[in-house]
Amino acid sequence: MGRDVVRTLTAWEVGALGHKYNLADGHAALPCAVDDVPPDLLPRLQATPQRDLEERFVRAFGAASGEHLNRDELVMVATASQALSLTCLFLAREGITSVGLIEPAFDSLADTVRERSLTPVPVPEDDEEILRAVRDHDAVLLVVPNNPTGWSPSPATLEQIPALAARSGCTVVIDRTFRFYQPHTDRDVTAVLGRTGFHWITIDDTGKTWSTDESKVALLRSSSPHTLAALREYAEVAMTRVPSFNLHVVAEAIRREGGPARACEAALKNGQELDNVLRPLGFTPRSADSGLALYRLPDDCPLTGAQLADELLADGVAILPGAQFFWNTPADGRSLIRIALVRPQNYFSRALEEMQHGLRRSMRR
């Protein structure tokens, strides 16, 4: 089925930048821990070898994730979008034509797959469907935990993926950009990636966890040296090297925050406050921990999620509609809205006050 929506989720997020309360963008937006940039920082960074900055970042990220990481076994780019684009380029050049893609998912994933002349095939959030996709497709792209639902395959399903993928020859791509909000799930994923005999690629991104505005770092890893070499070559040709400022600021933010705890705490507290507002109005939560909240509108709500999101903009509150996450069957998300949680608590509380007024006005129709 073709999509029956026009505005992409990225367009919604860009539109949110001009509004008082931005609860649309899924990146972490707490006060930046790195608030003291010395005047000589840029000259010092320019004088520092790129490799040294990369190794410092890798040590900081590895300490936060509890992993021993080797800089030479990573490809670093500036954004997760770039990482996904390079991954899809690799798949296309390996002769893959279709990719099993989790649905729902941020619509840019399906768009990027299509831009590389690959065909995305929807894979529902269901354990048996995930295993079937690994058996039947040359490549599968999962987001664990998923955006916008926070859904993750069960530990038993994850356990079965290596052997299935080894037999079928499926390349398993896992977007782990929300990994720190579900450490229990991520431990299972990390254990699976430690297995030998199957081909995997992972994408990490710091922007969902550490508040450094657009100074982000994305990481690509793979079980295959051939794949890493190809991804590194594509990144160099596309000149996607991470700026030295990004490497410094993100490494310093991770160090000063002592890992992901600050973002996780904000998501938990704000999620509870949001639930206290929405449940009495008849909204139903549809998501697990991921730094995001997905809610279904009340059955008697006269508006779709997109219409409600548009109306809330009049009150200065930006959220995302659910339809575009269902990149293959948008009608399945028409009654859903997604709200970003990693915000300062006072900011989030004020945004909820404005949202509450707008919701009550809309619900009275």
Image (tube, rainbow, N blue to C red):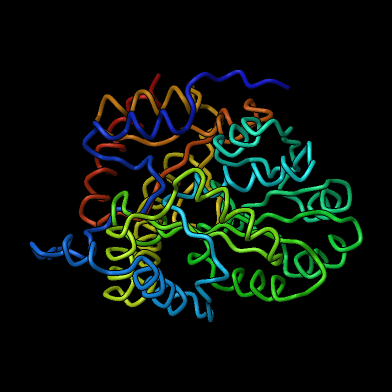
Image point (64%, 25%), residue name: 331
- x and y percentages locating residue 281 in the rendered image: 42, 39
**Which quarter shows the N terminus?**
top right
- x and y percentages locating residue 356 in the rendered image: 31, 38
Q: Is residue 174 visible?
A: yes
Image point (59%, 73%), residue name: 184
**Occupied quadrant, residue 2:** top right
So how many labels did they put on this image?
0
In the image, is 242 to the left or to the right of 72? left
Question: What is the residue that sits farthest to the right in this orientation?
Answer: 167
Image point (38%, 74%), residue name: 259
Work out whether residue 317 or residue 161 is closer to the camera in this orientation and state it.
161
**For residue 117, above or below residue 217:** above
**Occupied quadrant, residue 124:** top right
**Occupied quadrant, residue 310:** top left
Image point (39%, 55%), residue name: 242
Work out whether residue 165 or residue 364 is closer to the camera in this orientation and state it.
165
Q: Is residue 289 visible?
A: no
**For residue 81, above or below residue 35:** above
- x and y percentages locating residue 162 in the rendered image: 81, 67
- x and y percentages locating residue 342 in the rendered image: 35, 55
